[in-house]
Image (cartoon, grey):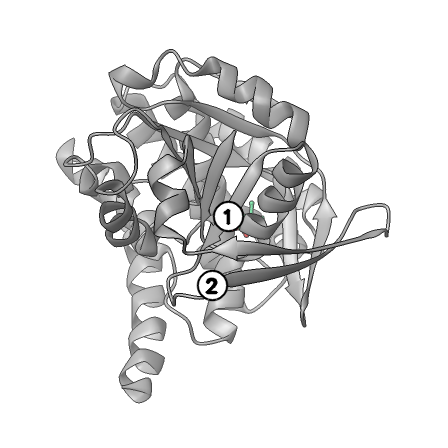
Amino acid sequence: MKITVLGCGALGQLWMSALHKQGHEVQGWLRVPHSSCHVSLVETDGSTFTHTFMANSAEFLTDSELLLVTLKAWQVSEAVRALAARLPAASPVLLLHNGMGTLDELRSVEQPMLAGVTTHAARRDGNNVIHVACGTTHIGPVTPDAQDYSRLAALLQQALPDVAWHDNVNASRWIKLAANCVINPLTALYNCPNGALRERPEEVREICCEVALVMEREGYHTSPDSLLYYIEQVIESTAANISSMLQDVRQQRHTEIDYITGYLLRRARAHGLSLPVNSRLYEQIKRKENEYERIGT
Ligand code: KPL
């Protein structure tokens, strides 16, 4: 299969390598155009895989049978809209990013859209990408014309297991959103690894209560306790991790807060709910982000 991977960060490089090893033809697409993308991946068993991929070939894009998007949420809509015009109309677009809300910005895209969440962990270390931990990728259709693409899950499963297909993937996306609403802003504000949130059970619970309210209104059966149980497990299993939002703040990059807590607040508003705890966290992160973005311009 011919696949273009949009976004060549740690996760993008992980997927490019895994798909290439399965015999797929893969190119990378970088926002700052380059003709190639060199990947040096350290696998979970310590072995190394290196390969130089073709990048930003418009010709390859026009024949691509899948566009796999691994950009940060705030980069997605502009980049996907720019490529969709040159991608075959029947080739699906699979979005793999933290947060939600990009689909609202991609309504004009005619390709079938799928979305997913992953618990694979990968990070950059100098010129290398380290595949820190294996995980599961949950994918499914988010537009009606994408319902027949369950074969994609089998293809991706061969490359980078585990991959699970869900007819209603938004339930999994909301649960991941809940974890991100708790862990990302708190770790970014307290400048701590995920595991340090064990010491802040009250704040974690308050956020879970508000997220559960919105999820119920959105039609997903949940409770503060079940979210709390799940999020405590994520905190344990990623205890040594520096969350993506804390990494962004430390490197003074734009964060995904508008697609995490920001999305939650937009959905709450639509249901006439006010979420004081999440609103405060949103404002605190925006203030931090504005401080360094103002200085940087
Ligand atoms: O997805 C994550 C992130 O850092 O963005 C979590 C689940 C919080 C793991 O670090």
Q: Can you name the residue that lies furthest to the front here? A: 59
**Residue 213 at x, y = what percent?**
32, 30
Figure disc tally: 2
Q: Is residue 27 left or right of residue 268?
A: right
The residue labelled by disc 1 is 27
Identified at 65% across, 45% down, the residue is 17
Q: Is mark 2 within 8 Å of ligand 1?
A: no
In which quarter of the view is residue 16 placed?
A: top right
Crowding at dot 1, Cα within 10 Å, few <14 / some 14-19 / many 20+, comes out as many
Q: Which of the pair 41/66 is nearer the observer?
A: 66
Placement of the C terminus among the 4 image quadrants: bottom left
Mark 2 and mark 1 residues within 8 Å of each other at the beta carbon: no
Residue 111 seen by the camera = yes
Mark 2 surroundings: few (<14), some (14-19) or many (≥20) residues within 10 A:
few
Decide: is 148 above or below 29. Answer: above
Q: Residue at x 43, y 44 (%)?
A: 97
Percent x, y of residue 270: 14, 34
178 up-or-down from 261: above or below: above
Query: Element at badge 2?
Result: loop
* Residue 105 at x, y percent in the picture: 19, 43
Three-letter amino acid code at disc 1?
A: Gln
Position of 105 compared to 261: left or right? left
Query: In the visual, does 238 lie left or right of 288?
Result: right
Q: Above or below — where is 124 with respect to 89? A: below
Location of mark 2 (residue): 35
